[in-house]
Image (cartoon, grey):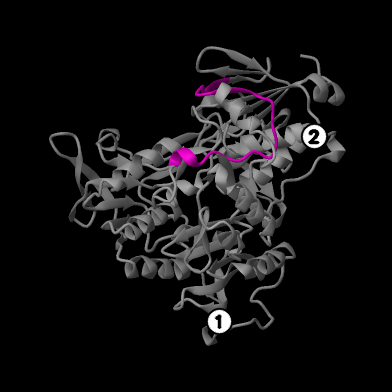
Amino acid sequence: MHEVTLEHLKREGRIVVVGASLAGLRAAETIRDKGFTGSLTMIGDEPYEPYDRPPLSKGVLLGKSTAERTALPRRRAIDAEWRLGTAATGLDMAARRVKLADGEEVPYDRLLIATGVRARPWPNAAEGELDGVFVLRTRDDGTALARRLDAGPRRVLVIGAGFTGSEIASACRERGLEVTVAERGDAPLVGALGGVIGAVAAELQRENGVDLRTGVMVTGLEGDSTGRVRAAHLSDGTTLECDVVVVSLGAQRNTEWLAGSGLGAGPRGIACDAGCRAFDIRGIVTDDIYVAGDVARSPHPLFGYQFLSLEHWGNAVSQAETAAHNMLSVSTDRRPHIWVPAFWSSQFGVNIKSVGVPSMGTEIMITQGSRAERRFTGVYGYQGRVIGAVTFDNSRWLQFYQQQIETTAPFPVPFPTVDRRPDGHRPVPADFPDPSVPTHGPTITLSGYSPADRRMTFTPAGH
Amino acid sequence: MLRLVVDLNRCQGYAQCAFLAPDVFAMHGDEGLLYDPQAEEAQRERLAQAAAACPVQAILVDDLDRDLAGVAEARDA
């Protein structure tokens, strides 16, 4: 394989994008924006054109839209060859070819991997296949779950009170459905936002009629003679009757297809440099393979150069743009991906937004508003600086705190703020779970040194 | 059909869109926004106004003046 010059690449090169969702689409648009006139191939395992996932756990479950109506708008035409409904199954880095499930091989000069994540399935496969047991990640998942909620189940059980699980519970309550949430940690959202905020999330759930059970695990699901789920067994010995179960135990990275390829890909994602170039298993950065979106793990200078894996909508867009820019730029024109993490969630009528990395925070100050009123700003501190912030119905202040994070402003915040309450003058421990203790249902532990040797040990809930 | 997406990291709940295109956008709680990511052709003008009026320019609509080439492109696949 001879190296093509940049101009030649732009004119008649071959770019392949694996993963036809948000990151893949925005990358493709940026690639064309940069003047790339060669061939562009979009490979996606789902049969649908790129669609937006956030509405699936919000408007779609509320019946305000449908999963079929979530196709993403285009910024421009991308003139691509689409290979939808065909998963990539392998990568030959030396020959620069992507292998597809239908046996075909697609050659590339530059490759972008944006294969994202999938919902972590219920660990007991037979129980997971019971009629009425769902996960929520894809358009098909959204269609199936919305249809079942339309049928008016007697009780929905949501396993896991992260953002997705909490949003599903919220939608159920808004539709008047009985819902139980089982969470192994002490509170909803505790892994992302800590116990101080988790306590507010727990109150929100209970006030809105959710039967929230924390500190418990679901140890088994039981079906009736027709194969429909009818009950769940909990670790506290209780049995809960339910006819819909939604497993919301986080995500797994779609990297299995890269096993044995020599690329630094494994259960934790694909490691890449700040310029979105993938590492191979030797820890050497590749010149022709780029990564973006949920599957990527890249070092962030603002956060101690930690390799951050961000399953955030905004990260997918920003990293895709950077990867696309860099793959068509000479080395000195490349840009680092230094997007400040940000996400939103909407649940129980409250708009929750965050910037930075709250989970790095050791302390939190409620600088504005009050938790009791469900309208506040919480600022997270780490080693004397502002590292993250969260707002509940207070999002207009978030941009200010983002600047604080970007400029490594001191913590505790030394300045007065509008609407500061008496309990907001001093930081308190942010109360994140001890990372050495599993907080979620099933647990994954990793061993092995190089990504190729890495092994994942799965401990199902209840052990 | 028109496709749209709102960058909810940017959205700060000014609700201009909910006033200008109430069949597409609705406030949900004090600050949250709910919207239908696909709008009928009849909403074209209102949607364009909403996108233009958004103080934080968070609304992306498939190029309103263009035949949706991207749609045909994907459907042909």
Q: Amino acid at mark 1?
A: Gly
Disc 2 or disc 1, which is closer to the eye?
2
Query: SS for tag 2?
Result: loop
Query: SS for tag 1?
Result: helix
Q: Is residue A41 above or below residue A114?
A: above
Q: Is residue A323 above or below residue A256?
A: below
Nearer-N-terminus badge (2/1): 2
- State yes or no: residue A184 in magenta: no
State the residue in front, A59 or A248. A59
- The structure residue drawn at horizontal position 55% and vertical position 39%, both measured from the top left corner, is B1
The image position of residue A17, as x and y in percent, is: 64, 28
> CB atoms at circles 2 and 1 under 8 Å apart?
no
The answer for which chain carries disc 1 is: A
In the rendered image, is residue A283 in sight? no
Q: Amino acid at mark 2?
A: Lys
The image position of residue A434, as x and y in percent, is: 46, 60
Residue under label 2: A34
Q: Quadrant of the N terminus of chain A?
A: top right
The image position of residue A127, as x and y in percent, is: 25, 37
The image position of residue A213, as x and y in percent, is: 29, 61
- The structure residue drawn at horizontal position 55% and vertical position 61%, both measured from the top left corner, is B18
In the rendered image, is residue A63 in sight? yes
State the residue in front, A12 or A174. A174
The answer for which chain carries disc 2 is: A
Q: Is residue A317 above or below residue A450?
A: below
- The magenta stretch spans which residues? A67-90
Residue under label 1: A424
Q: Residue furthest left?
A: A225
